[in-house]
Amino acid sequence: MIPQKTYTKQALFLGILLMATWLVNISLGSVDIPFKDLFQIIFGSNESKESWNYIVWNFRIPKSITAILVGSGLGISGLLMQTLFRNPLAGPFVLGISSGASLGVAVLILGSTFLGSFLGAFSPSSYSVTIASSLGSFLVLSVVLIAIKKIRNTMSILIIGLMFGSISAAIINVLSYFSSAELLQQFIFWSFGSLGNLSWQELGVFSGILLFSILFLLKSIKPLNGLLLGENYAVSMGINLKKTRTLVLVVTSLMTGVITAFSGPIAFIGLAVPHLTKLLFDTSDHKVLIPSVAFTGAILMLICDTIAQVPNSEYTLPINAITSLFGAPIVIWLLIRKQKSTI
């Protein structure tokens, strides 16, 4: 085990690294803003160009905050799922919440082929897409909550979530088959994920839900540590297994649903960040892991967003592709390195 002082130093390092990646993220883009001018803009100086002020405050800062929230939320959700199911391949989307959100958006965008007269009043926009995604997530969440009451086996809940993902994917495939190329392209663009579509008002709602979920979760640190040794051991410690499982599933579903609703489905982060954090901190204590995973997820998401912006270029790459292309090789390398060190 690593001494507590070392954890503090590592947490301080992550905090400094997060601030550095945040500053780099908001300074780079199609318009390169020097750090000197960036500090003037952030601290209220009027010496910088008016256009730079507008870019920073109305686009780059909201987008960077969204990246921090998405990375933190997906990282924590992935950690919770891997702990609850004791499965290193579990991620925030295993419950089918993201698939339900995708189905809601698919019905809105692609369903006009079958429900044109009904959906005509709901033309796809940022608000209607968010509402449709939220309704899809809520539908799957409701079924998961019913399953929690009926089923005691945790793995059965996992299988139900995977089945809902398959059902949602099948319906989306049918809708896609009968949709026009224009509507299909619109849905595909949404599925790429995006961090730059939120206004300050939407960002307030988004951050409020995520922060509430994380604070609500802090009560369950001890039960989560008990689950690492198995459900029977957790029960012998006096942990209310049903209550803990319900809390974890509700918090994960809420965070995953709101992230997908506001930013689209974003792959890799929730699966890989918990492993990456455990390699860096060498601990299984959730008191250390939860904040560390939040910081690591935020940093990784900011780095991926900076790459996706293609600095000094007018092009923006799909964030969903960058998270996998950039992050997966790093985790593979770290796992191989750890395996070699244990031989």
Image: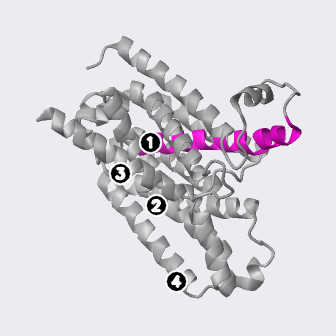
Q: Is residue 153 visible?
A: no
Earlier in the chain: of badge 1 and badge 2, it is 2
SS assignment at label 4: helix
Q: Please, what is the dominant secondary structure of the magenta stretch? A: helix
Q: What residue is drawn where x is 48% and y is 51%?
A: 323
Q: Which residue is mark 1?
A: 248
Q: Nearer the viewer, residue 239 or 335?
A: 335
Q: Which is in the foreground here, disc 2 or disc 4? A: 4
SS assignment at label 1: helix
Q: Are marks 3 and 4 in contact (CB under 8 Å)?
A: no
Q: Quadrant of residue 167?
A: bottom left
Label 4 crowd bin: few (<14), some (14–19), many (20+), radius 10 Å: few
Q: Which residue is mark 2?
A: 96
Q: Which residues are magenta?
A: 49-78
- Disc 1 marks a residue whose amino acid type is Val
Q: CA distance from mark 2 to mark 4?
A: 18 Å
Q: CA distance from mark 1 to mark 3?
A: 14 Å
